[in-house]
Amino acid sequence: MSAKNKAISESLATKTVLILVALAYVSLILLLPLLSVFSEAFRHGIAAFKAAIVEPDARAAIKLTLTVAAISVPINMICGVAAAWAVTKHDFRGKNLLISLIDVPFSISPVVAGMMYLLLFGAQGWFGDWLLAHDIRIAFAVPGIVLATLVVTLPFVARELIPLMQSQGREEEEAALTLGAPGWRIFLWVTLPNIRWGLLYGVLLTNARAMGEFGAVSVISGHIRGETNTMPLQVEVLYNEYNFAAAFAVASLLAGLALVTLVVKTLLEWRHGDQLAAAGH
Amino acid sequence: MAATIISPRKGRGRHSPLPGLPLTLGVTILWLTILLLLPLAALFSKSVALGPGHFIEAAFSRRALASYELSFGAALIAAAINAVFGLLVAWVLVRYRFPGRRLFGAVVDLPFALPTAVAGIALTAVYANTGWVGKPAAALGLQLAYNPVGVVIALTFIGLPFVVRTVEPVLADLGKGIEEAAATLGARRWIIFRRVILPEIFPSVVTGFALAFARGVGEYGSVIFIAGNMPFKSEIAPLLIVTKLEEYDYAGATAIATVLLLASLVLLLLINIWQGREHRRRAL
């Protein structure tokens, strides 16, 4: 028995070396950068950190980031659930095409995603003249930032829910239907309890990306201080002004958000792993 | 189990009795049209409006070609590094038990959660000449930031979880039966890994590699701080788009963006075909 185990496993020395190399690699490219954010943020003490956070432009950036997330996360949650319902509870032509389309934002460069909206809503864009005539600002304003955020976070909820709901089938909903329940009650009472952890997982990832998106938002925002700078953009502005302490102070808030996201994500995977589609995002 | 529940694809004539198709499909199509199809149409129509001559001139100028070379080349190198180390990390996570294993596993997802701009300035702080790693490297004569090496470092950071999370489930599903059989036949451990285990997990390594590569080609936030951004030397393609936009050269930006977009759509298609084939092979 022990000989057999030995044959399908590595020697203790090999194991130790492999584990140490893996740890070293992850420390070098992931952990050191993470630690450096906090170390740089608090380099000049807590008072300097606080001053950088409560400064008016930083506060405006925090407020804008929260606002953009508060608008875009619910929209993509509702539309993602609708897409998953249509795709998994019904059959129709072009379904696979629809699923593939939902994947597209994952592969587009964020800069390209943001730029497409400039071509629609910028001064030279398709709707540029009309928007100008009606005094509506989308590019270089908050609506543009929301749109750019929406497109880069579009797939997260739907990509989590589609495989999950596909594996759960339609039988429970069909049973509820024969008992005479109306559609919205079938969804709320039968489907939602089955998908709640997957939905939370998708919303968590959507929110992390929405608050942290940089490339797409950078192109469309116009970088107006105190007005269209989100937290990641504010980090860039401060950094380019060589105000490293303040840049890292704002960055540390975003890093804190990332850590909270990772903790909740890990908890969800441990506790409710069986109710998640793929712990692979 | 799942396969038996999903209704047969061919029964197109049979309608699902469940309600809500018009509403949910309508919402979905509206959502995809506003956020994706309309903007894509704007990009393509702008490209077409340039005319083939202008398009080629702008899309394949010397500066643009240099930026593609860097974006694709650095993404390729970073994805290759991650294919090796990502496989190692996945192996260690699945096969070995050691203190802190779960924490280690959670940290691997950091690039999915950390905003790219934060990653960018953090990597620069660590790998520039004054940083924790950059300083000892500089003493050895190695310059890790503000050059193409910096681009590779940033893309290595971004790509790792794609490989680990793709390989991990396949490795976990791999029964030990064949390994045991090979071992009873007297095969050495390394031979078993190369001849028995690697062929089984290799397709997933390729998928992870491709996903990391595709992400790396379009990556912007984590790269621009550490890259140096010198035209012809350390300027990635997405940055060139931003530069063109800031100069109000919408034609130039559109041409480069279209090239990048087509490249990523082709990559997405290839990955889907590859994954579909693998899925069927594994299901057999």
Image (cartoon, coloured by chain):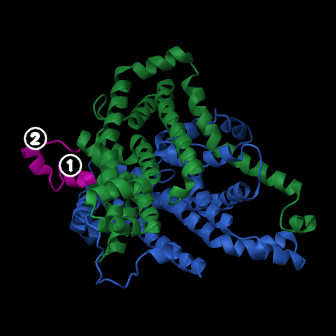
Chain colours: A green, B blue
- Figure check: B13 above or below A220: below
The image quadrant where one finds the N terminus of chain A is bottom right
**How far across and down, in percent of the image, does residue A71 sit?**
29, 42
Q: Residue at x 70, y 75 (%)?
A: B199
- Figure check: B36 above or below A233: below
Q: Which residues are magenta?
A: A117-140
Q: Nearer the viewer, mark 2 or mark 1?
A: 2
Mark 2 nearby-residue class (10 Å; few <14, some 14–19, many ≥20): few
Mark-to-mark CA distance, 2 and 1: 13 Å
Q: Residue at x 24, y 43 (%)?
A: A143
Q: Which residue is mark 2?
A: A135
Residue A26 visible (yes or no): yes
Along the line of sight, which residue is nearer the eye, B137 or B207?
B207
In primary-sequence order, the first of circles 2 and 1 is 1
Q: Chain of mark 1?
A: A
**How far across and down, in percent of the image, does residue B131 sit?**
64, 34
Q: Amino acid at mark 2?
A: Asp
Residue A140's disc number: none
Q: Which residue is mark 1?
A: A122
Side of B274 relative to A192 (left or right): right
Magenta-colored stretch includes residue A122: yes
Residue A220 visible (yes or no): no
Mark 1 nearby-residue class (10 Å; few <14, some 14–19, many ≥20): many
